[in-house]
């Protein structure tokens, strides 16, 4: 019986750790969304995708958003457009959840640095879609319109 090479043990440990972290992030996303008293409607989430891409594009072009935040959003767009993902999109549910987690984290960063008003001002979708997005990012809605 041969022992497993050290490099393979390290690799398996890193991959296992990443899988656990990703699972924890998915659970955190679901808990954050349910904390608002809403259940997850996966059709609604799928309908949000085009609006979220337009939102990220608008935020990246918005000169009132800090430059560093705009660069992060441009990087996010590049990641979303890349054909290679951390978890391939052809894997049911999980394939798109990794993108949702990355978008939620990036938009949370944008809210922290640019404010909820920037999201509200640049949101191209429905008020219900914006409310769902704000629930996922953990942002508190402020007064004003929720669409462009």
Image (cartoon, grey):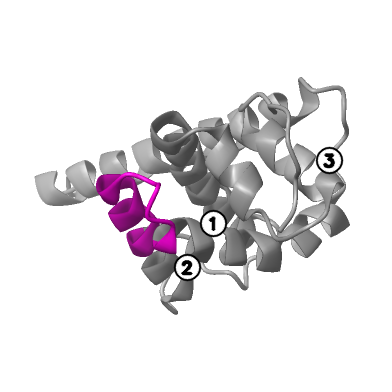
Assess whether residue 115 is covered by the magenta stretch.
no
Q: Which residue is mark 1?
A: 99
Asked whether, in this view, residue 139 is left or right of residue 127, the answer is left
Which quadrant of the structure image shows residue 122?
bottom right
25 and 109: which is toward the camera: 109
Residue 92 visible in the picture:
no
Q: CA distance from mark 2 to mark 3?
A: 22 Å
Predominant secondary structure in magenta? Answer: helix
Which residue occupies 67% across, 36% down? Answer: 134
Where 27 sits versus 129, above or below? above
Q: Quadrant of residue 141?
A: top right
The x and y percentages for residue 33 are 73, 31
- Give the residues in magenta: 61-75
Say whether disc 1 or disc 3 marks the residue closer to the N-terminus. Answer: 3
Closer to us: 130 or 138: 130
Q: Position of residue 59 (x, y in %)?
A: 48, 56
Q: Secondary structure at mark 1?
A: helix
Q: Earlier in the sequence, mark 2 or mark 3?
A: 3
Q: Is the Cβ of the residue at disc 2 closer than 8 Å to that at disc 1?
A: yes
Secondary structure of residue under mark 2: helix
- Crowd class of label 2 (few under 14; some 14 to 19; many from 20; radius 10 Å): some
User: Residue 41: horizontal and vertical position, in percent?
Assistant: 87, 47
Which residue is rendered at x = 54% and y = 56% of the image? 99
Does the CB distance between marks 2 and 3 fall below 8 Å? no
Distance, label 2 to label 1, CA atoms, is 7 Å
Q: Which mark is residue 80?
A: 2
Residue beneath disc 3: 40
């Amino acid at each position: 019986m041969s022992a497993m090479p050290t490099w393979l043990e390290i690799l398996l440990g890193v991959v296992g750790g990443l899988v656990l972290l990703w699972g924890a992030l998915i659970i955190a996303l679901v808990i954050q969304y349910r904390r608002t008293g809403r259940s997850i409607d996966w059709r609604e989430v799928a309908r949000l995708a085009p609006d979220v891409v337009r939102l990220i594009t608008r935020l990246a072009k918005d000169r009132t958003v800090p430059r560093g935040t705009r660069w992060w959003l441009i990087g996010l767009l590049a990641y979303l457009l890349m054909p290679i993902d951390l978890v391939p999109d052809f894997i049911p549910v999980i394939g798109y959840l990794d993108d949702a987690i990355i978008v939620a984290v990036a938009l949370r960063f944008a809210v922290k640095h640019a404010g909820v008003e920037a999201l509200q001002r640049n949101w191209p979708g429905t008020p219900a879609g914006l409310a769902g997005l704000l629930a996922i990012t953990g942002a508190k809605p402020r007064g004003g319109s929720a669409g462009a």
